[in-house]
Image (cartoon, grey):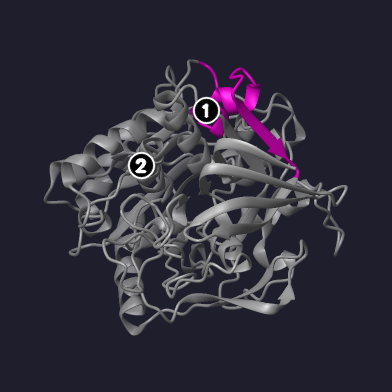
Amino acid sequence: MTEQYDLVIVGTGPAGAVIARQVHEQNPDATILVLEAGSDITGVAGEHLVEADESAMNASYDDLMRRARQIEYVKGAVSMTEIEGDGWTPESTGVFPAAFFGHNFAAFPGASVAWNIGGMGVHWTAATPWPYAEEIPDFIDRAEWDADQEVARGLLRSYVGPLVADMDNPFTEPIFAALREAVPSPDPERQAGYMPMGGVARAGAPFARTGPRDIAPFLFDGSAANVTLRTGVLVTRLEQDGDRVSALVTRDLVTGEEARYAGRVVVVAADALRTPQLLWASGIRPEALGVRLNEHATIDGEVEIDAARFGLTAADIPVPPNGEPFIGSYWSPSIGAERPAHGQLMEREFDGRHLLSVGWYCATEIRPENRIEFSDELVDSVGMPHMTVHFSYSDADLAEIRRTQAVQLAAANAIGVFPDEEREIQPPGASLHYTGTVRMGADDDGESVVDTDGRVWGFGNLFLAGNGVIPTALTCNSTLTAAVLSVRIARAVSAAL
């Protein structure tokens, strides 16, 4: 038997939640099914880990994020599941290196996947900087983009200001002034300032980071009668009838039982790795599938804040409320081709030291050589096509990395003394902001997988969403950009219904 729905969405991360929210509001009578392979990680499905009440996950998140290094969070997140060796099971939850599933990610070793309800949306730092200049697709009308970006910012609850509403921090303005002098911008709106963050600043409480549950609460709490969430089921194949997806075949990861679902419209929002993997497994193999994998280079570091140069002392360092890992979250925006790099700077106190993490992302070239190779013979831990990633930096990328290191050095030295041992280029994949594997394009020219509405070329009812759809080389964190495109895609899905 095949269950019938108006819309079937694969994935409960931010993109899937945005699609569900927008389509439900625009088509309130539509029946929606959302499928998720993972299970609950906190006890409240879809909530951000910072909001997990006194749980071990909250403690783990707090400890790892205090280190303010994405790669350490990814490595540490595996330990959250108490997995040892090859003991991974489908019931496990958390963030896992992609190689843990048996894939060959030697060239992209930092890459990881979320295996839980809410996807990466329960783990993310919640940074929501917006794209600029070349980061915005030139084939989308700018007025439409700006309008959709405002909707996306609302859905992610993007906020600019102190993380804790009533916490006075005398270091903030001196840090801004130092950064603006060291990393100047000709555009007053692109100067160093607060990092836009997805969530709600509260008095005397940790910043309430946005999780997928905050985007589409009805999806996770069961309050909408015509919206259904099924978890612990892996979509293994999309069956086709001509130019339409006729059914989704799933496998229960505990019982092994297969089931079939049909949707008048289907949206796959798995992630930038598993969305193209599912298409490949289904025999949907456009020339651009998995090709032009892109990720901004990640240049990490931290500097001890020199209070004396700002006329302050250690007694002036504010103490954030219990459960909030950061004192402040700041941003040094990119300014386009002149400086295609952006800084994410997190103020914190750790091991008795007052630190500013000075992480910088710089754009890298979009090249077909950087791609995912899928196998027709080998499979991963859950029986899906084995992936081998081919990824390297071009000479132009290496030059841009060196240029960005100079920017980072100038910024850090404006705050304190930046030791060599505190500077590090992270391994490819470590940012978790990889894009382009099912990229959007204006023409079916073999260089894109979906059209400007997110519809797969040659299909009438199959749409894709998420980071993989992003067609441009980003400097900024990718979540807001993916959400902007998801708002656009949801509008096309609603029209198709």
Nearest the eye: 344 or 78: 78
The residue that appears at 44% across and 58% down in the rendered structure is: 459
Residue 281 location (% of width, % of height): 63, 67
- The quadrant the C terminus occupies is top left
What kind of residue is marked 2?
Ala
Nearest the eye: 355 or 183: 183
Q: Is residue 66 visible?
A: no
Cα separation, mark 2 vs mark 1, equals: 19 Å
Element carrying mark 2: helix
Q: Which residue is mark 2?
A: 492
Q: Which residue is mark 1?
A: 216
Q: Is residue 278 visible?
A: yes
Element carrying mark 1: loop
Q: Is residue 207 magenta?
A: yes
Is residue 279 shown above or below 366? above
| Tally of numbered tags | 2
**Labels 2, 1: front one:** 2
Q: Is residue 307 magenta?
A: no
Return the residue found at the far left: 186
Is residue 416 shown above or below 99? above
Dividing the picture into quarters, in which one does residue 195 lie? top left
- Range covered by the magenta-colored residues: 204-232
Residue 488 location (% of width, % of height): 33, 42
What kind of residue is marked 1?
Ala
The residue that appears at 61% across and 19% down in the rendered structure is: 225
Residue 446 location (% of width, % of height): 36, 74
